[in-house]
Amino acid sequence: MKLYDYAYSSAGYRARIALNLKGLKYERSVVNLIKDGGQQHSAAYKAVNPQELIPTLETDGRVIGQSLAIVEYLDETYPTPPLLPSYPAEKARVRQIAYEIACDIHPINNQRVRQHLKALGHSEEEILSKWYAHWIAIGFAALETQLSGSKETGQFCHGDTPTLADICLVPQMANAYRFKVPVDAFPTLVRIDAACRALPAFAAAAPEKQPDAA
Amino acid sequence: MKLYDYAYSSAGYRARIALNLKGLKYERSVVNLIKDGGQQHSAAYKAVNPQELIPTLETDGRVIGQSLAIVEYLDETYPTPPLLPSYPAEKARVRQIAYEIACDIHPINNQRVRQHLKALGHSEEEILSKWYAHWIAIGFAALETQLSGSKETGQFCHGDTPTLADICLVPQMANAYRFKVPVDAFPTLVRIDAACRALPAFAAAAPEKQPDAA
């Protein structure tokens, strides 16, 4: 099992957490998003993933891109421990939380989008304060309302075992901390993030624990 | 079953296609994204969906936001006809295609993002030509490579029955046509989109067929 990955890719971070939670051994092939103008744009990597995005998982003769497709595949193929609850309505709640991050926060703030904003004339400072922090604040505010107001929230986003929702939350919180986006207004997210990071599977997946970390 | 929806919401469009493919009757509650400064920001709708985004499905006493969470829920709860293949590796392919659109094209071009770009000083013309068209072109180019190069592509994105991938593709193609983004370079996408729109479930879900269409 081979994961094309980069320490500071938060989508890659999701895949690492899922692989660790499942107790799966995997080889990492580092695709450095900074070096050589972005190694994800190399012909070799484009042949693996035409989207030129991280991560990609090679397993069982298949090549799977998109972190959430990877997590769902791992959950179906290696069911223990489950990363989604059993009941469809509960699965829907977990997926809703996951997609709020994976669709409506992360991709808008992704490296290629920030690079494009720079090409359109925005300064690094403006991109950080008026874009990056803006989408995190809006997204986290909605999540805080939902998570703090639901009895289904437990030690983690859904109950007392980690799920796909936590797999998305932790890397997004790491991005917020890394770029010093204030999180004081989101105590439930802060609490759940800390609970996750106390688990070895999450801790070992952290960007700073990867050999390619700066 | 009640769907909070707007004719021109492409995420709402996805939910409508899925409901139609499943043959489910549903009531629509229109949340007009233009009127009243955006009815999705009303206190009443925020109580339903703190994200202030469309669509939301109310069913079986649950409130489900995020279109893909809605589609997966419907597929689990009403299994016929299936919207995902049976095998995990094939599911992963379908989800990968779906997420390439639902994470990496659509949210970056969504109305609230365009409004924010306008607030940062960009003209409508610039937003359309240097942003909206840009992300569609990049995303569609990757999809065209993947779909045209795979034997698993059939009449539809995966085989000869519509799946979650087609449910995401058709509304994104509609956005491209609506804003006159060129699609000549993507013949496989054009072909699959036309095949989908020939089906009654897709046709009836089209924005222009909704009572709240302009």
Image: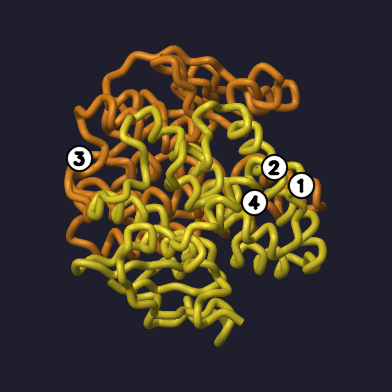
Chain colours: A orange, B yellow
Please report whichever mark, 4 or 3, sits nearer to the chain's N-terminal start. 4
Q: Position of residue A72 (x, y in %)?
A: 35, 35
Q: Which residue corresponds to mark 1? A: B184
Front-lying residue, A123 or A9: A9
Question: Of the numbered discs in the image, which one, if any, rests on residue A128?
Answer: 4
Badge 1 density bin: few <14, some 14–19, many ≥20, Cα 10 Å:
few
Question: Of the numbered discs in the image, which one, if any, rests on residue B10?
Answer: none
Q: Nearer the viewer, mark 4 or mark 3?
A: 3
Badge 3: chain ID: A
Q: Residue at point 33% right, 28% down?
A: A74
Quadrant where the N terminus of chain A lies?
top left
Q: Position of residue A208 (x, y in %)?
A: 48, 25
Badge 1: chain ID: B
User: As displayed, is residue A188 above or below residue B44?
Assistant: above
| Circle 4: element type | helix
Q: Which residue corresponds to mark 3? A: A161
Q: CA distance from mark 4 to mark 3?
A: 33 Å
Contact between labelled residues 1 and 3, with CB atoms less than 8 Å apart: no
